[in-house]
Image (cartoon, rainbow, N blue to C red):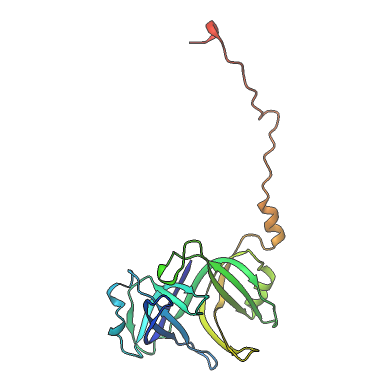
Amino acid sequence: MNLITATAKFIGPAQTESGVRCMHLEIQNQGAKALPVPIYLIPTRAAGDTFVIDAYEQGTTLLFTGRMYPSESDHKMYIAPTTPLQTVQANTLLNQVQVAGGVGFIAEQRREDLFSCGMLCKAPAQKLVNFTWDDSVPLRLDAWGDDAVRFRKFIYKGRQIAIGGRLKYECWPGKDGETRTAYKVQIRGGQYTFFGKNTPEKAAAAAKVEPPVRSAQETVIPQPVPKGDEIPF
């Protein structure tokens, strides 16, 4: 599962690395330190006639649902709409992410009230952003407060999880003076489910399937095949 439903302001036309014309939008997040989230909608059959870049004025608020395709090369978040785009009122705020997959890594924990990890989830192939069926969608997850405590206790590399959250965008100066950016999914309180055993040791033990042991009564002894006149009719 890999879906985002959100409202975003239309900034203007843009292009993918391969030159495909797309739409640059920004999701508005609440909070004093929250940054607008830059996203790039690519044309899809599902969006149909609503994906007409020149039909929207700058600042128009659009409602969309789509799949996320973060690019490791140009560090942009591309969205492939799965439904037609809709124009909504400017004060409409929505930012809901629903994803499921396996934990790829667990980040160094520098705060007791924060747990960060990486997730790998699947999505259909998307030629416009050079995404194949063999690729996985990498996402960074953040859990806070009591949720961070539960994640620290029950999450390990390889565990399957499904979460609901909101897409965030962070920006900070690197040690080399260059600006660093990152997309993250902040998990909403209680919107998550773990699958499998609660510890990696139990999960590994459950994965070992021993061959069944047959009792003497269950053992089948082959019988000789009758020959000639001995064949019954």
Please name the residue shown 44% across and 76% down the image: 78
Given residues 183 and 127, the one toward you in this image is 127
- The residue most toward the right is 201
Locate residue 60: give its quadrant: bottom left
Residue 196 image point, x, y percent:
62, 60
Nearer to me, 17 or 183: 17
Quadrant housing residue 16: bottom left
Left or right side of 199 for 77: left
At x 40%, y 74%, the residue is 65
Residue 191 rendering spot, x and y as whole percentages = 54, 73
Foreground of the two, 149 or 80: 80
Q: Is residue 21 above or below residue 195?
A: below
Q: Is residue 44 left or right of residue 192?
A: left
- Judge from the rendering whether residue 218 lies leftward or rightward of residue 10; answer left or right: right
Q: Position of residue 172 (x, y in %)?
A: 59, 89
Instruction: Identify the residue at horizontal 46%, vertical 64% (top origin).
Output: 132
Please identify the residue farthest to the top as the structure is shown: 229
Residue at 53% from the left image edge and 75% from the top image edge: 72
217 relative to 52, above or below: above
x%, y% of residue 154? Answer: 67, 68
> Which of the 4 quarters of the picture holds residue 189?
bottom right
Rendered position, 216 above or below 31: above
Decide which of 113, 12 is in the foreground and name it.
12
